[in-house]
Image: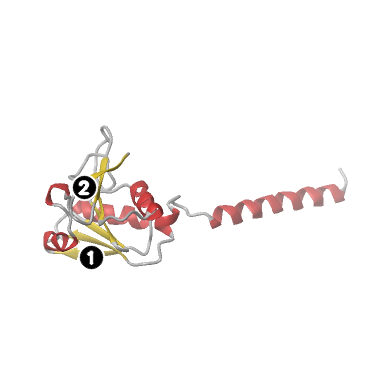
């Protein structure tokens, strides 16, 4: 093979590599573009005595939006009362993202849907501490039923994961 062919092949390989690097670098590493690119405040209000809250906060920052701020409170429930999170849908922490609350160990797929669709609701909730949910140990069993909480406090199913 001639020297010219080697130069052409090397150039094509370098160009293909650079193109791949450029395209891969432009995409969100997490795949959750709406969450990753959200430019407003994101605050995760956690209980200072809860270990899974820290794990969820790390999950959100690593996979969703690294700008999310963790706020530890002695008691999160008064804050949840102010936000209108129904008692029967509560977990241990709540995230405020823009005008929405996101209650519990919420998978980012649900937060992504919320931010893309922008429904006229107060927020979404995954009640309890289901096994296998982000921040929780164990294996997922069945669907996670995520509820949309209306501005009047009523709620209905938002999605299943």
Dot 2, crowdedness within 10 Å: few (<14), some or many (≥20)? some
Quarter of image, res 140? top left
Q: Which mark is residue 71?
A: 1
**SS label for mark 1:** strand
* Residue 41 image offset from top left, x and y in percent: 33, 67
In the visual, does 157 lie left or right of 29?
left
Query: Is 82 situated above or below 157?
Result: below
In the visual, does 107 lie left or right of 88?
right
Q: Point out the image quarter for the C terminus.
A: top left
**SS label for mark 2:** strand
Identity of the residue drawn at 45% across and 54% down: 33
* Residue 112 image offset from top left, x and y in percent: 38, 51
The number of callouts visible is 2
* Residue 149 image offset from top left, x and y in percent: 23, 51
Quarter of image, res 57? bottom left
* Residue closer to the observer: 140 or 51: 140
Closer to the chain start, of discs 1 and 2, is: 1
The mark lying in front, picked from 1 and 2, is 2
* Residue closer to the observer: 28 or 158: 158
Identity of the residue drawn at 37% across and 47% down: 109
Identity of the residue drawn at 42% across and 52% down: 32
Q: Point out the image quarter for the N terminus.
A: top right
* Residue 23 image offset from top left, x and y in percent: 59, 53
Residue denoted by label 2? 155
Identity of the residue drawn at 68% across and 50% down: 16
Distance between the Cα atoms at labels 1 and 2?
Answer: 26 Å
């Amino acid at each position: 093979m001639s020297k010219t062919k080697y130069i052409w092949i090397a150039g094509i390989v370098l160009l293909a590599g650079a193109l791949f690097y450029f395209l891969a670098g432009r995409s969100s590493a997490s795949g959750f573009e709406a969450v990753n690119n959200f430019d407003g405040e994101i605050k995760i209000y956690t209980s200072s005595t809860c270990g899974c809250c820290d794990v969820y906060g790390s999950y959100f920052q690593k996979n969703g939006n690294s700008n999310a701020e963790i706020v530890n409170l002695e008691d999160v429930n008064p804050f949840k009362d102010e936000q209108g999170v129904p008692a029967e849908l509560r977990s241990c922490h709540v995230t405020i993202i823009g005008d929405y609350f996101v209650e519990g160990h919420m998978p980012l797929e649900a937060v992504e849907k919320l931010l893309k669709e922008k429904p006229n609701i107060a927020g979404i909730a995954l009640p309890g501490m289901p096994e296998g949910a982000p921040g929780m140990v164990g294996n997922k069993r069945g669907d996670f039923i995520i509820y949309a909480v209306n501005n009047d406090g009523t709620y209905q199913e938002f999605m299943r994961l």
